């Protein structure tokens, strides 16, 4: 009996550990304010369709831009950064938008920024972690 209880406990720990490892989601929610993404870190499975719900509670237009793998914006988002955009959406103040995009197929960390003038400098940045499941 004691051996069976021990085996069940080990099995339960393994199942719970496996559930907690992923953290990747195909349904994301983000709130935009002046000047932050909340949350500002996301984890998605590589190559999967992702649904993103954006709530804009700020007073000025914002963008949610995912940069290509290995590309990061410097101190300012400018024209040189345009070719390095993987995906983007522009959201007006007070809007609630639900959109879909396909997550990058290459695992790694991708920078998220708001490309509006002065917003990167104000700290409107985040990261998207793409993992293979």
Image (spheres, rainbow, N blue to C red):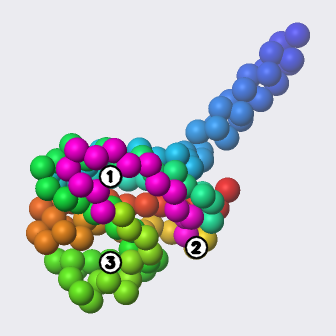
Q: Earlier in the sequence, mark 1 or mark 3?
A: 1
Q: In the image, is 102 to the left or to the right of 8?
A: left
User: Which element carries disc 1, helix, strand or loop?
Assistant: loop
| Front residue of 62 and 129 | 62
Cα separation, mark 2 vs mark 1, equals: 20 Å
Q: In the image, is 39 to the left or to the right of 78?
A: right
Q: Are marks 2 and 3 in contact (CB under 8 Å)?
A: no
Q: Using the rendered image of the protein, determine whether residue 110 is visible from the camera's viewpoint.
A: yes
Q: In the image, is 34 to the left or to the right of 4?
A: left
Q: Which residue is mark 1?
A: 40
Q: Residue at x 24, y 70 (%)?
A: 115
Q: Where 99 falls versus 114 (above or below)?
A: above
Q: Earlier in the sequence, mark 2 or mark 1?
A: 1
Q: Residue at x 58, y 73 (%)?
A: 106
Q: Which mark is residue 72?
A: 3
Residue 91 colored in magenta in the image: yes
Cα separation, mark 1 vs mark 3, equals: 15 Å
**Quadrant showing the N terminus:** top right
Q: Are marks 1 and 3 in contact (CB under 8 Å)?
A: no
Chain part drawn in magenta: 90-104
Residue 94 colored in magenta in the image: yes
Are there few (<14), some (14-19), or many (20+) residues within 10 Å of tag 1?
Answer: some
Residue 41: where, in percent of width, then height?
A: 38, 53
Residue 91: where, in percent of width, then height?
A: 28, 57
Q: Which residue is mark 2?
A: 106
């Amino acid at each position: 009996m004691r051996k069976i209880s021990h085996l069940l406990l080990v099995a339960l720990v393994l199942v719970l550990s496996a559930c907690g490892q992923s953290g990747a989601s195909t349904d994301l929610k983000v709130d935009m304010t002046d000047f932050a993404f909340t949350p500002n870190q996301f984890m998605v499975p590589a190559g999967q369709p992702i649904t993103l719900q954006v709530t804009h509670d700020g007073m000025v237009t914002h963008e949610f831009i995912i940069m290509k793998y290995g590309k990061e914006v410097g101190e300012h988002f400018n024209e040189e950064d345009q070719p390095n955009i993987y995906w983007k959406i522009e959201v007006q103040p007070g809007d609630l938008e639900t959109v879909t995009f396909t997550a990058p197929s290459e695992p790694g960390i991708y920078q998220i920024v708001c490309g509006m003038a002065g917003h990167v400098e104000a700290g409107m940045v985040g990261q998207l972690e793409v993992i293979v499941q």
